[in-house]
Image (cartoon, rainbow, N blue to C red):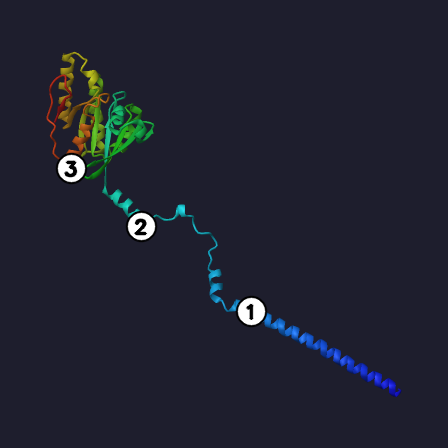
Amino acid sequence: MTHLTRVIVRVDLRWARLVRRFFRLILDRFLACSAGRYRRLGSRSSSSPALLAVVDNVPNEPPPPASVSAPPPCFADSEADAAADLVSLKVSLLGDCQIGKTSFMVKYVGDVEEQRGLEMTGLNLMDKTLVVRGARIAFSLWDVGGDSRFLDHVPIACKDAVAILFMFDLTCRCTLNSVINWYQRARKWNKTAIPILIGTKFDDFVQLPLEMQWTIVNQARAYARVMKATLFFSSSTHNINVNKIFKFITAKLFNLPWTVERNLTIGEPIIDF
């Protein structure tokens, strides 16, 4: 190998070393920058454990909408207090068909549009709430159909009732004769309820001959004595003694003053107790 050739080889080797150093320097700086960037990203994510904890604790289901949230405690307490102040009184109505029991209930409860009731085969339920001397009283009225096929409703209608209204049509004596059977059936299931004997359709009754009126009055009073019941003649059409009957029930239950006097005058609505 000549001298010139050896010089060229050494130059090439030096140049190759310089090129390798240059690329190594570039590569080292690139790796250093990359490592620093990776370290900064890693430290940023690892330095926020609270954030990771919050993300881990997010529930799988969204929170419930406001419309189904629980009511405020004060609202719940007010509802509970209102329910606690309400006194429920169950009253049963018994008697033959077509004697005016449902009309009697409707007259007391109010207009048809304002009624809150439940009607099923052979049983009609209506409610009315009123305030008596600051106390809220809810009358629950249970009307049993007068047909014999509905007699199975008598036990559930009479159970826990505070008063039982035994009703008959003043213009039809056979309905009065049936009262004793209704009374005997009811007393099998409730021996403590206040018994009240009610003659309906008084507005038609006064059109009858006086002799017939007298006969019906005497028979009704005799039945009331046997049943130990108070006797009222009423008319749903003219609202005669309808509200008065429930005032009487309230007075008897709560020992309130009862100022109504007996009325045994023929041609006037009878009240006998």
Relative image position of residue 195 (x, y in whole percent): 18, 29
Q: Which residue is mark 2?
A: 73
Question: Residue at coordinates 16% horizontally, 17% vertically from top-left?
Answer: 216
Separation (CA) of disc 1 from disc 2: 48 Å
Give the SS element for disc 3.
helix
Q: Which residue is mark 1?
A: 42
The N terminus appears in which quarter of the rendering?
bottom right
Question: Residue at coordinates 40% horizontally, 48% vertically from top-left?
Answer: 66
Q: Amino acid at mark 2?
A: Pro
Name the mark nearer the viewer: 3 or 2: 2
Image side of residue 261 versus residue 77, left or right: left
Circles 1 and 2: CB distance less than 8 Å? no
Q: Earlier in the sequence, mark 3 or mark 2?
A: 2
Question: Residue at coordinates 17% horizontally, 31% vertically from top-left?
Answer: 247
Above-or-below relation of 221 to 39: above
Image side of residue 232 versus residue 55, left or right: left
Relative image position of residue 72 (x, y in whole percent): 33, 49
Image quadrant assignment for residue 168: top left
Give the SS element for disc 2.
helix
Separation (CA) of disc 3 from disc 2: 33 Å
Q: Earlier in the sequence, mark 1 or mark 2?
A: 1
Name the mark nearer the viewer: 3 or 1: 1
Q: Which is more toward the observer, 246 or 214?
A: 246
Separation (CA) of disc 3 from disc 1: 81 Å
Q: Amino acid at mark 3?
A: Phe
Give the SS element for disc 1.
helix
Above-or-below relation of 71 to 221: below
Question: Residue at coordinates 26% horizontally, 43% vertically from top-left?
Answer: 82
Image quadrant assignment for residue 194: top left
Relative image position of residue 169 (x, y in whole percent): 22, 19
**Category of crowding for the residue at label 1, using alpha-carbon neighbours closer than 10 angstroms: few (below 14), some (14–19), many (at least 20):** few
Residue 254, label in figure: 3
